[in-house]
Image (cartoon, rainbow, N blue to C red):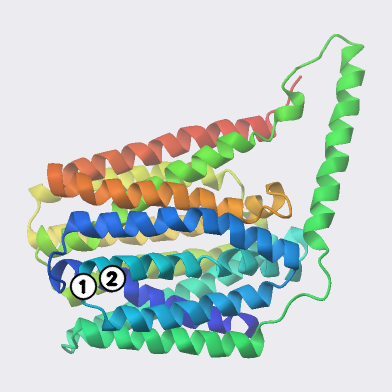
Amino acid sequence: MSSFIGFVFHKICFGLLSVLLPLYITQSISGGSLSVWGIIAAAATFFAIPFSFLWGYLCDALGRYRFFILMSFAAVTFLLYVFSLTTDLLSLGIVYVFIVVFRVAHEPAKNVLIAENYSSRDWKRGFAFSAALAEFGWVVGLFLGFILTFWGFASATLLVVCVILSFVSFILSAIFVSDPVLFFERSLVTLERSFSLVERGVGLLVRLNHNRYDSGELERENLYALCFGLIFFSLATSMFFTPLPIFFAQSLAFPSSTIFALFLINSLGCLIGYALTQRNHNSIKETSITRVPLLRGLLVFSLLFLGFFSLTEAMVLSVIVLVFSGFVYAFYSVSVLSLSMEMIPRGKTGIFTALLGAGTGIGCYSGPIIAENFGFSYMFILSAICFFLSFVVFKIFTRSRYTEYI
């Protein structure tokens, strides 16, 4: 558990930043707008995609996972400090791109450390535990933002707090994080999958003699479907959440403290979900990846009715949507992380982060652009459609993975 303390403070920092940055750029920086924030967020995400491959490859090639975690946290701390001193919009955008590029460096290393510290059968429990700690940090960060804005602290002060939190995450990781002595579990899973493939091939030869051959037998695990499902889900999520703080601030006129409180509620729902997944990790089915996009699509679609409600009723509906959206995401996250460690081969751990980055980047750009030029209602509709597309593609994946051929 001590190995993850630094990650908790890292999440506290970015939990605070998650709401602070869009509000800071659109309200405190000259020339900042919803579209500008979308362009900055999308540019950062797209630039981070090739680096996700690079960091993942270098982690596996060098076997120095601790180094990349420390490098990531140190670079982010320095860049956040530079960001806090910058007032020019273009310079802010460039610095933010570098923050995201170096931030993703720790993700492949962290996932591998979890995979190697748990047996493959306990990966879901390991990822659930890590995600619960991370979500706890995110909740604390949002709560900190709520308290500081409620007390009237300026955005510049909150940025300084983020720099301090990031520095603490670096120090704690330097003390507690260490590389595994042996790298065994992921190699074992690869070997087991190879034996499974041979076994299915032998089964096919037997069926040939009985005229029961099915050409799709060796393609049950449709990796392409999994990849497209991940992209659609991350696209829908970022399309929805990137402009959401601005929606609450502009369309519903909520103060900053209330916006922090709403996102805090979302993360609390997610935290409860992670706690349940850790306790009942053996009963979590991979079919969660099909149910969660469907539920999230319905929740986002329900926000179209906000215009028919009073301000109080709109806040209640927003709370319901955010709580359940966060809660169900926990089940999706644990299932997807476990699947990625099983299906993505050693040396390509950055693929998972890159796939999420591709969808996130498109959503970061399109969500604010659509909201500013056509209205938030159209953004909600397109986000819901992308969730439904993710549901369809994941359904194809699960069927190709589990269907029995007779």
Query: Which amino acid, by three-letter code, is at mark 2?
Result: Leu
* Residue depicted at 44% across the width and 45% down the height: 233
Tell me, yes or no, if residue 69 can be seen here: yes
Query: Which amino acid, by three-letter code, is at mark 1?
Result: Asp
The answer to whether residue 189 is left or right of residue 109 is: right
Neighbourhood count class around disc 2 (C-alpha, 10 Å): few under 14, some 14–19, many 20 upward? some
- Distance from disc 2 to disc 1, alpha carbons, whole Å, reads 6 Å
Say which mark, if any, is on residue 92: 2
Farthest residue to the top: give it.
211
Tell me, yes or no, if residue 305 can be seen here: no
Does residue 172 sit above or below 194 in this rendering? below
Residue 288 in the image, given as x and y percentages of width and height: 54, 47
| Number of on-image labels | 2
Does residue 93 sit above or below 301 in this rendering? below
- Circles 2 and 1, Cβ within 8 Å, touching? The answer is yes
Q: Determine whether the residue tagged by mark 1 lies in a helix, strand or loop.
A: loop
The answer to whether residue 379 is left or right of residue 229 is: left
* Residue depicted at 55% across the width and 67% down the height: 105
Say which mark, if any, is on residue 88: 1
